[in-house]
Image: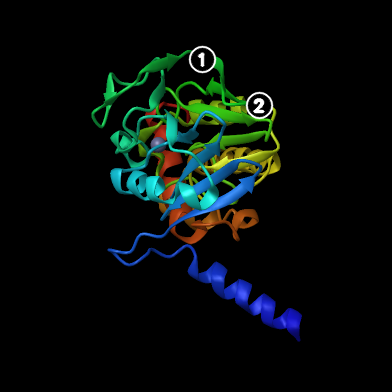
């Protein structure tokens, strides 16, 4: 009986989780990942928060309100003020409001813009760089073009947590229609992330997972590409492909209902735009 009740609760939670929050309500929390590594949730976006003996290292500011909230709540996890702010990339839904952490070292890839939401880097890194901060190692790797043109994945050691933003998320479909990205480059970004050595996949969206979740995200992209390409080559319309390419293996992933048709549309647009159908 107890098991039954727990199962019901879990089902209720899972059913409620993907829905949009009411307009003014922002759900924020610090979720322990492992060791000194936390995910800060801000509705559907995550920052990585790492306690070190030199200060707290944060990856991605999200926005000014998220930064102010984090500053007010670092004490709840016995973390010192933010001393370093790393940017995974420069899309403003992840990269706004960095000035919430005045005085912090601001680290961006060398191809990132001069300033992101008015915040300039104080240190720029190349395609593969490792920085020691307060007893932790931050290994940054540029995944290259695809989703943005300078996507940094950071692996934190000794916890072996990889913070991977937007190119993949555990058990969640990619966002909408890929916004005109080159999707073979995007698949290449996932492949590059797969080469990294880590134990926990901490994402910019959704909940933490494993390296296997990254492998599954790659398989999804390959299945999507192959299915859409076969449909286009058979002369089907995008509507017909959407009806046929149900991608059932991913039916329990987040945003499956809403974003599968948009993922198909985006992949079809990409393949046609790049002349890859014949
Ligand atoms: Zn992005």
State the residue at coordinates (70%, 28%): 197
Q: Secondary structure at mark 2?
A: loop
Q: Is residue 9 visible?
A: yes
Say which residue label 2 marks.
196
Left or right: 110 in relation to 141: left
> Ligand 1: which quarter?
top left
The quadrant where residue 111 appears: top left
Q: Residue at x 49, y 45 (%)?
A: 174
Q: Is residue 41 above or below residue 58?
A: below
Helix, strand or loop status at disc 1: loop
Tell me: is circle 2 under 8 Å from ligand 1: no
Horizontally, residue 26 falls left or right of residue 255, namely left
Give the camera-side residue of 266 and 114.
Answer: 114
The mark that comes first in sequence, 2 or 1, is: 1
The answer to whether residue 134 is above or below residue 245 is above
Question: Left or right: 167 with respect to 101?
Answer: right
Give the alpha-carbon distance from disc 2 to disc 1, as whole Å. 13 Å
Q: x%, y% of residue 230?
A: 56, 40
Which sits in the foreground, 88 or 237?
88
State the residue in front, 199 or 237.
Answer: 199
Q: Residues within 10 Å of mark 1 (few under 14, many from 20)?
A: some
Q: Position of residue 262 (x, y in %)?
A: 41, 50
The residue lying furthest to the left in this view is 118
The total of numbered circles placed on residues is 2
* Label of residue 181 in the image: none
Residue 127, which numbered label?
A: 1
Q: Residue 210: percent from the left, percent from the top?
A: 68, 43
Dot 2: few (<14), some (14–19), or many (≥20) neighbours within 10 Å?
some
Q: Residue 102: percent from the left, percent from the top?
A: 31, 32
Coloring applied to the structure: rainbow
């Amino acid at each position: 009986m107890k098991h039954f009740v727990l199962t019901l609760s879990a089902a209720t939670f899972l059913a409620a989780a993907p829905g949009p929050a009411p307009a003014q309500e922002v759900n924020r929390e610090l979720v322990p990942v492992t060791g000194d590594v936390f995910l800060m949730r801000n509705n559907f976006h995550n920052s990585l928060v790492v306690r070190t003996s030199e200060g707290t290292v944060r990856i991605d500011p999200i926005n000014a309100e998220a930064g102010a909230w984090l500053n007010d709540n670092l004490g709840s996890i016995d973390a010192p003020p933010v001393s370093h702010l790393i940017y995974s990339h420069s899309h403003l839904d992840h990269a706004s409001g960095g000035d919430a952490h005045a005085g912090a070292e601001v680290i961006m890839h060398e191809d990132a813009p001069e300033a992101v939401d008015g915040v300039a880097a104080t240190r720029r890194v190349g395609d593969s760089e490792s920085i020691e901060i307060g007893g932790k190692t931050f290994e940054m790797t540029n995944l290259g073009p695809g989703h943005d043109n300078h996507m940094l994945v950071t692996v934190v050691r000794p916890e072996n947590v990889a913070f991977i933003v937007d190119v993949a998320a555990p058990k969640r479909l990619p966002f909408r229609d890929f916004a005109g990205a080159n999707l073979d480059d995007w698949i290449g970004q996932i492949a590059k992330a797969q080469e990294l050595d880590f134990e926990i996949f901490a994402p910019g969206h959704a909940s933490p997972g494993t390296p296997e979740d990254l492998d599954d995200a790659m398989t999804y992209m390959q299945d999507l590409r192959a299915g859409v390409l076969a449909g286009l080559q058979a002369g089907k319309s995008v509507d017909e492909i959407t009806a046929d390419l149900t991608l059932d293996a991913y039916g329990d992933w987040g945003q499956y209902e809403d974003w599968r048709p948009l993922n198909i549309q985006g992949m079809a647009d990409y393949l046609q735009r790049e002349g890859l159908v014949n």
